[in-house]
Image: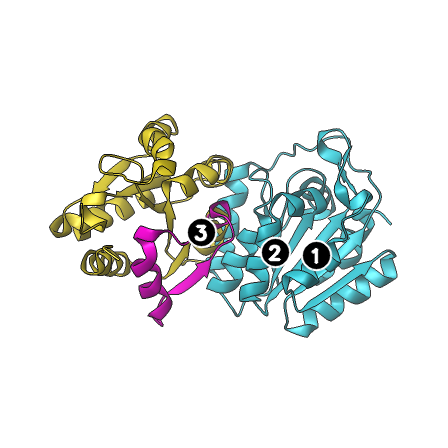
Chain colours: A cyan, B yellow
Amino acid sequence: MTRLDCLRAVYDRLADSAVVTIMGAVAAELQSIGHRPNFFYLQHAMGLASSVGLGIALSRPSVPVVVFDGDGSVLMNLGGLSTLARYRPANLVHVVFDNESLLSVGGFPTATGTCTRLAEVAAAAGVPRTACATTIDEFVKEFAEAQQARELTTLVAKVDAIGPSAFVTDLGLLENRFQFQRYLQGR
Amino acid sequence: MPVSAANSQIVFDALKASGVRLMSALPETWLVHLIRLADDDPDVTLVRLAKEEEGVGISMGAHFAGVKSAMLMQNHGFLAAINGIVSGAQLYRIPLLMLISDRGTFGERDPWQTEGGAVTESVLTALRIPIMRLDEPAKVAHRVKQAQTLAYSASKPVALLLTRDLMWEDA
């Protein structure tokens, strides 16, 4: 299963959500499918995508929020999982693409490849709904159920450690940031 | 506990008057009353953090969603949040109001606070973050408002340093 295939499979389900992604491959691949004003790509501040999503979800409970996170980013802010779980916003779906690797910086293996199981970490942190998908069909089913559940969900997708050849796109960071803010203001 | 409840109330009222509706915090002695006030106020969302850097992301999201926020933290928490401040709030031009208790300066009795106290202002300056000190109760409301105004006009983080003179009655 590739991350790009996962993103393609749920792309149409993102139209009504505020979407926050991490840097690198996730941001580049989602943009390659098609940028939308409701997508914000956190191109640095590694680990904080779920925190940005939490800030949006708590501030605007009527807006569905989707965060596309990664194993390296989650491991860098494991405490953030406990904060997510503590406030458990019902309008947040937290997807973690787990490729067991810090792909964007050369493929350094993370602990999820040897011992750490992030769906179980999230469950133990107190996230009320968790799942781990290893096939596209599982991923799409779990993502759709999470969007319907109205309960905080962390969905871990085990994906191959492959990504695009380049990460820089022609969408400026500030252009994206202000466009996203205006999108939320209009909702 | 000789943390000033009256001056904590003044700071809290000033934050509310400047429109702050979400506060993220980690406990620290000088902040106990402020955090309790935030927790007790139905108009304020208090987010209790595991680590201060999370608060930068939460404030970014709140700002995108149109909610004014503030971070309540100790200076060591500020030091722990620096990457988020630089590669989140500064990179993305976020108006970020940070209230930082300035431990480890003159009058500090806890040895473990002293190194942080010695570097806080110079680190803030190195990051080009504007600083204002809150030391006199009568000036708190005005300075909080000024800090918020600059944060929004510049779209950048600003720091208000909570000083011993304001927060500690036994100073």
Q: Pointer 2 indicates a residue of which chain?
A: A
Circle 2 residues within 10 Å: few <14, some 14–19, many ≥20 = many
Q: Position of residue A136 (x, y in %)?
A: 86, 57
Q: Which residues are magenta?
A: B27-55
Nearest to viewer (mark 3 / mark 2): 2
Amino acid type at circle 2 is Leu
Q: Nearer the viewer, residue A178 or A100?
A: A100
* Image height of A180 relative to B161, above or below: below
Q: What residue is at 46 percent from the left and 36 percent from the top?
A: B82
Q: Reading the chain from its start, which is encountered first: label 2 or label 1? A: 2
Q: Position of residue B131 (x, y in %)?
A: 27, 36
Q: Is residue B64 visible?
A: yes
Residue A121's tag is 1
Q: Label 3 amino acid?
A: Ser
- Mark 2 highlights which residue? A81
Q: Nearer the viewer, residue B52 or A170?
A: B52
Residue A185 falls within the magenta-colored stretch: no
Q: Residue at x 60, y 44 (%)?
A: A47
